[in-house]
Image (cartoon, rainbow, N blue to C red):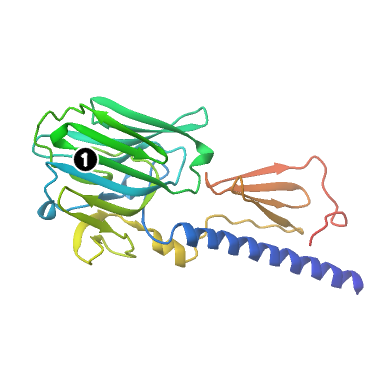
Amino acid sequence: MGTEITFMKKICMQSLRLLYTLFALWSLTLNCFSQGLSFYGNEKRISERSSFQVFTEDRLPDFSKELNVSFEYSVQNIGSPGYILLLKDENSGKAFNLNYLYRWDGSTRFIFAEDGKKAYYSVDYANGDLNHRWIPVSIHLYNARNRAKICIGNDSILLEDIGLKGEAFSPNICFGMYDYILETASFSIRNLSVANEKRKWTFPLNESHGENVHDSSGTILGKVKKPVWLINQSYYWNPVFTHYSSTPSGITFDKKQHQIFIYTADSLFSYDLDDKASRQIPFQNRISSRDLQLG
C-alpha cells in the first residue's frame, strides 16, 4: 500500500510539473504576442500565406516628399527567407524592399534594396539574438533629398543617393505577398506606424477576425488577405506538439534553448519551439521503473 501511495505522489508531481511548464509557455506567449499580425513563409503553402496592404488604393496618402514606416519585427521561422516589406510606386514602377536571408553559418541577414536592381544596406544577426524577440525596424525615405535612414535593431545607417533623383515616388506599402512576390519570410509585426511630412497614422493590429485593418482612431484604411491575428494565439490554446508514453515520464523546459525535454524509461524526446521540430534519442540501456525517479 505504501509503495502505491509513493507512486501516486510521483505521478501527481509529474503532472504538476507538466502543468507548470505549459502555464509558463502560455504566459510567455501571452506577453510576447498579445497583438499583431503574423505571416507564413516556406513552412506553409503559397495559398496559405498572407498579404497586407497598409492603405487600400482609394485611401493611399501622398508620400512623394517623405515616408516613414516603423514597426516591431519578430522572426517566426529562422530558416524561412524571403520578402518582408515592399514599397512600390505603381505609376513609376520603382520599388524598394526589405528582405530576410537565412545563412548556413548560424546567422541571418536583413537587406534593404531597390527591388530587382541594387542592395543599399545589409545587417547580420546571430540566430540566437532573434529567437522570440521583438526588434524595432524603421525605413525613412527623404525623397526630395534622395536619401534614406534605415534602422534595424540597434543598427542604423543614413544612405545617400538611393536612385530617386527628384523622381515622383509615392509608394504602396505592402507586407508579405504582393503581385509577383510569393516567397515571403516567416515573421510577425506589431506597433505599426506610417508617416509623411504632414501626418502620422498608427495601426494597433489588434483585430481578431476579418480582413479590414483599422488605424488607432478606428478608421478602416488597409486590407489583409488570409490574416493570422496574433491576439487569437494569446487567448486560445493552440496545440503544437503531442507526446504519449505507456511508462512513467518526466518533463523539463530549457529556457535558453527554447526546448521541451521528455524522458521515459527507454528514450529522450525533445521539442524545439523555434523550429517546431521533435526528436527522439533512444537510450542504449532501458531504465528500470524502480530507478526512474520522478518528483
Residue nearest the viewer, comparing 73 with 245: 73
The residue beneath circle 1 is 87
Q: Quadrant of the C terminus?
A: bottom right
As drawn, 213 above or below 187: below
Circle 1 residues within 10 Å: few <14, some 14–19, many ≥20: many
**Quarter of the image where one finds residue 204:** bottom left
Quadrant of res 155: top left
The quarter of the picture where the N terminus appears is: bottom right
Rendering coords of residue 172 (x, y %): 17, 45
Residue that appears at 86% across and 69% down: 6
Estimate the x, y position of residue 169 in percent, counting from the top left.
12, 38
Counting from the top left corner in percent of width and height, residue 24 is at 59, 61
Say which residue appears at 31% left-offset and 43% top-offset: 138
For numbered disc 1, what is the local secondary structure?
Answer: strand
- Above or below residue 117? Residue 51 is below
Amino acid marked by disc 1: Leu
Q: Please say whether residue 49 is visible from this viewpoint.
A: no
Which residue occupies the foreground of this view, 209 or 188?
Answer: 188
